[in-house]
Amino acid sequence: MINIIELVVFTVLFVLVAVMGFLAGRWQSGSNLDHLDEWGLGGRKFGGWVTWFLVGGDLYTAYTFVAVPALVFGAGAIGFFALPYTVILYPIVFLPVLRLWSVSRSHGYVTPADFVRGRYGSPTLALLVAITGIVATMPYIALQLVGLEAVLRTMGINGSGILGHLPLFIAFLVLALFTYKSGLRAPALIAFVKDALIYVVIIVAVIYLPAAFGGWGSIFDSASAKFDATPSPADGILLNSNNQLQYATLALGSALALFLYPHCTTGILASRGRDVIKKNMIALPAYSLLLGLLALLGYVAIAAGVMPIVNESTGRPDSNTLVPQLFNVEFPSWFAGVAFAAIGIGALVPAAIMSIAAANLWTRNIYKEYLHRDATPRQEATQAKWASLVVKFGAVAFILFVDPQFSIDLQLIGGVIILQTLPAVAIALYTRWLHSIALIAGWVVGLAWGLFLLWTIPNPATGREHFGGSALTLSQLSVFGWHPFNSTLQIYVGIVALAANLLVAVVVTLVLRATRVREGRDTTIGRDYHADENDPELRPVAAG
Amino acid sequence: MTDNPPPRDPTDWDSGIPADRIEGTGQNQGNAIQFSWWNLLLLVPLLMLITAWYNRDAPRLFGMPMFYWYQFVFVPIGVACVAIVYVMTKGRRPPPAPRSNDTGGPGLEDVQR
């Protein structure tokens, strides 16, 4: 059954933002639109408000909004890790992102891999960082489609086969075209609408829904009763003795990884100056509060007896339809339509930024470095526009032809592998002591071991033997067959792999320094890391 | 290039102003790290990773188990820590010396305070 009112409200809001997206290219546009500084970074001049909406729309995605409550619904307290993750995130990245912004502004770096290239003079290391970024971002884009599709299926557009995916395809075609035309300005402008809608919807939901189900006390009690009834000892409204370490390391690892994702650095590099970023690091936790409240809607869904909808395409219940279904059941159709539009548009903003970030990486660190060294800025911009189209249609093809579960697995892997670029990108902002070859060695070990550990993790709940999650039981931790721990504690795989990565990087650096192996030249200087918007000799935007 | 620093063309990787360190030795001069004691406040929000302190049901607040409201309380704590660091370290930057001096020495002038 298609709900006409929901569909009309959704479509009207969706068309509105699509028009905004197309017109956004003219918004405060610079003199030279055929340059990556303009298309890919919006002219590097976004102020406080635009950055707040853009980065907020970038970090807190549609997928987050449907997947986090779904996780809380299914597993309980462990799903709440999204709150500590987004609280400790800002204090951790506050100082490093300022240095990254300054050095990138000084040298015209567009991607984190550009910085690595300039800092180490090593095209190989930059290539590895770029490829890691692209591989980690691609499934993330596909997951935005999963979020969008959850909304469409809840509205009744739940067909099977290719035809069932048609509305999704149309929505993404629109997205692809306005991103091609307007670049980063499109998601920046649309983010205003998206966030306004999201705030209204969630504030109404968290005020109205708890009252409707007898207050938070009885909601938590009914959730607790549900988890007590399940055979699994791992779920519950509190953590158990085994998953507390997993909870803390997952929050920490996710926080360390987030600003290594190319789409997050894109949002930061597009801002006007250091002060804009600093103020944003103070103001962005407003979204964390929202995310925490939203996560609790998973428990509200338990109290309301809401169940996920069966995806006609895969024949299985789609847990991501949980929050849309909660709105569908508990609110009038027009309000549900607004909520669905908020989630749907919430998918467009990060998907656009991610595809731009991936396109920038491709253009700067693969195309220009290896395929066309003499590319002009104009050729770079054209190349990036086309790359953004390819990236998005790649994501659509993923959803059309591959089980959505595969995207979710890849996203899980993506978080672990992007964390392996931390030494080359984040530590390099402070010191260049680590040797570039050692960083490559650390990256290889961290990546390989992280993937291997993920492969070994089963998921008894779904009966899968491999890639069953990111929680590694310490007794399963094996170093070439040696099991150093005898414990049932669980830990986040990403942190384990990062520790191995750092260990290898340090040891190999010591060896290389002792044997005086030379490395590339560092073209950055100390003052670059403190450059700010009004410095007299700052490099002009869109130069070169 | 004492008077006219060459334009920094980001498309040509080797055209930047030469590094202020000896190639390949890994000397980390010129990272210009500015430390302030206030920065240590940024570690305070990490205390919320110690789950043993709050992984319990009672006392409840507005019906929420302690596990949940305790973590919500850390949202304003995190904001306050970052805001205090922002206010107290405002304006601490290296003096904007002209770039043309950069090539003169090993860059010791870049290590501030």
Image (tube, coloured by chain):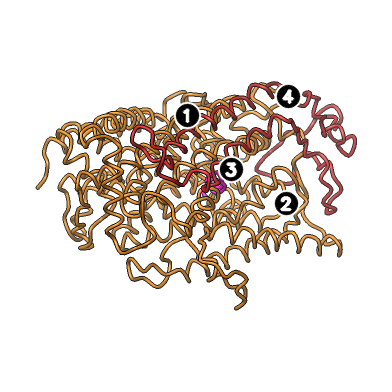
Chain colours: A orange, B red
Which residue position holds label 4?
Answer: B92
Q: Which residues are magenta?
A: A254-261
Mark on residue A52? Answer: 1
Amino acid type at circle 2 is Gly
Chain containing the residue with disc 1:
A
Which residue position holds label 3?
Answer: A376
Which residue position holds label 2?
Answer: A121
Which residue does the image show at 70% across and 61% down from the upper left? Answer: A503
Chain containing the residue with disc 3:
A
Tell me the element at label 1.
Answer: helix
Q: How far apart are labels 4 and 1 at the CA level?
A: 24 Å
Front in this rendered view, residue A237 or A49: A237
Amino acid type at circle 4 is Arg
For the C terminus of chain A, the image quarter is top right
Foreground disc of the pair 1, 3: 1
Chain containing the residue with disc 4:
B
Tell me the element at label 4.
Answer: loop
Which residue does the image show at 61% across and 49% down from the upper left? Answer: A113
Front in this rendered view, residue A378 or A366: A366
Q: Position of residue A491 (x, y in %)?
A: 53, 59
Foreground disc of the pair 4, 2: 4
Q: How far apart are labels 3 and 2 at the CA level?
A: 21 Å
Q: How far apart are labels 4 and 2 at the CA level?
A: 30 Å
Q: Is residue B100 above or below residue A118?
A: above
Mark 1 or mark 3, earlier in chain: 1
* Residue A344 seen in this snapshot: yes
- In this rendering, do the residues under marks 3 and 2 share a single chain? yes
Q: How far apart are labels 1 and 3 at the CA level?
A: 32 Å
